[in-house]
Amino acid sequence: MTEGVVETEQGPLRGGRDDRVWAWRGVPYAQPPVGPLRFCRPEQAQPWRGTREALHFGAAAAQRMAWLGGGRQRLGPTLSEDCLYLNIWSPAADKRLRPVMVWVHGGAFVGGSGALYRGGPLAAAGDIVVVTINYRLGVFGFVNLADASGNETLGRNLGLHDVIAALGWVRRNIAGFGGDPERVTLAGESAGSIIVSLLMLTAAAGPLFQQAILQSGVFNLAQTRETSLTVANAYLDHLGSTALDLRACAVDALLDAEEAVARRFSNISPAAPWFDGDLLPASFAEAQARATPVMPVLAGANRDEIVLFRLMPGPKILRMTRAALVDVIRRDCPAAVAANLERVYPDTPEGNRALGSDANFVMPTLHWAERHAARGAPTWVYRFDYAHPLLRACHALELFFLWPFPGLFAAALRGGFLTGRRSGLSERMRAAWASFVRTGAPGEDWPAYRLPERLTRLFDLQDRILADPLQVRREAWGGHDIEAGR
């Protein structure tokens, strides 16, 4: 490597130093999905002439929910349909072939970006290569306009195809950056974690990663095809005659439609992956029955996930009243299970907080891990218990201990600066994640999740290893999940 220059299949890239590592930002992994390529599957990036500068982040995906990223300025230099970029941090672009972690950001499928997650500290501390990616969001990536409009030239689940394309680019090129294409961990949080769980079901993504990290989300939050059509038809209704040529619609018109659809429904997300019977299984039940690859997986959730959605604007589906959530449980679970759950979760603030967190995130993730471990796959399970004074152990709080979010806003979310015991919590989590990426296990002090012991690591100012810490609630669910996207 000369002055940070690495050869790729499209041509040479020049990166720069980022503290103790090298970084290449704004690397195109596919052609811009604009004009005739809007609503199409991603196509391989075109070669460039000369050496391309990779010193600045690329545009973030077009979106209206910049609050999800903690500030518009950190999402990227601009918001655009032309968003299919990735970022790479590596200790050195040498021939050591370090393990690779590819990070899929969250944001309810309508917000966020790869630029929010600066991979330098994790790459340096773990001697690994960290890749963060963008993918199409909202109406551009996760709305079933193809089936609703009858236009077969439009693609389906395009955001998922974007992630597969990014993984393909990594497999073909990462060796030049000091990464091992045969040791790739696909990791994500929230929407990103749901994407990881879905891609574990697909033949197209199967050869592209060998390990997975699931943080707060699995495919119970994906939509049925019927729901996806209800959502897509609402977009077409709002767009009116302009829907006759979706590729000619202005970006703002499509984003306006996204916001209108979000206001219209109280219990349906305005954009989400759906079971399409093509890339993905045809139904939630089929997805549950399909065997996942026997690969190492680290999975978990935060104790009080639902608190974030009760205090901030966001998907209405995650702000259901107890009565509405109980109705969904009665719809999706056997009557005896539903009745027992109403007894186990009392109608109190604490009981309702636990019910909302468990129904949407904690139990589906745990049930997913149980099925994975039962197949003999190496599995590790955690629960994040560190409690912010107001937010408690809410959704996404663990990110502020894994990633180097700077400033007073991040400190406020952590409940203080990363000093003392908070710093220790951050260091232990980063070390465990890096160890998992490197070795396929998060460390000798974290036993694997096996039945019937169900040993689980609880992350807090003082970590604990407990056997089946949610036994009563787990048994009450009886392995059943709600279909939040139904």
Image (cartoon, rainbow, N blue to C red):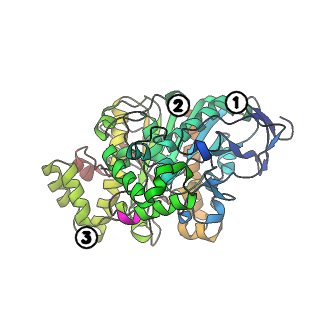
Q: Looking at the image, can residue 382 be seen? A: no
User: Magenta stretch: residue 263 in it?
Assistant: yes
Which element is circle 3 on? loop
Query: Which numbered disc flags the more N-terminal residue, 3 or 2?
Result: 2
Report the magenta residues as a range. Answer: 262-271
Which element is circle 2 on? loop
- What residue is at 74 percent from the left and 46 percent from the top? 23
Label 1 crowd (10 A; few <14 / some 14-19 / many >=20): many
In the image: residue 283, left or right of residue 30: left
- Magenta residues, dominant SS class: loop
392, 176: nearer the viewer: 176
Label 2 crowd (10 A; few <14 / some 14-19 / many >=20): many
In the image: residue 264, left or right of residue 117: left
Residue type at mark 3: give it.
Thr
Which one is in front in this view, the residue at disc 3 or the one at disc 1?
1
274, 115: nearer the viewer: 274
Q: Looking at the image, can residue 262 be seen? A: yes
| Residue on which disc 3 sits | 348
Q: List x then y, in percent, for residue 24.
A: 74, 45
| Residue on which disc 2 sits | 210
Q: List x then y, in percent, for residue 74.
A: 65, 61
In the image: residue 22, left or right of residue 454: right
Tell me how far mark 1 sits from mark 2, CA to CA.
Answer: 16 Å
| Residue on which disc 1 sits | 175
- What residue is at 13 percent from the left and 50 percent from the top? 336
Q: Quadrant of the N terminus?
A: top right
Q: Quadrant of residue 327?
A: bottom left
Residue 306 higher or lower than 10, as above or below:
below
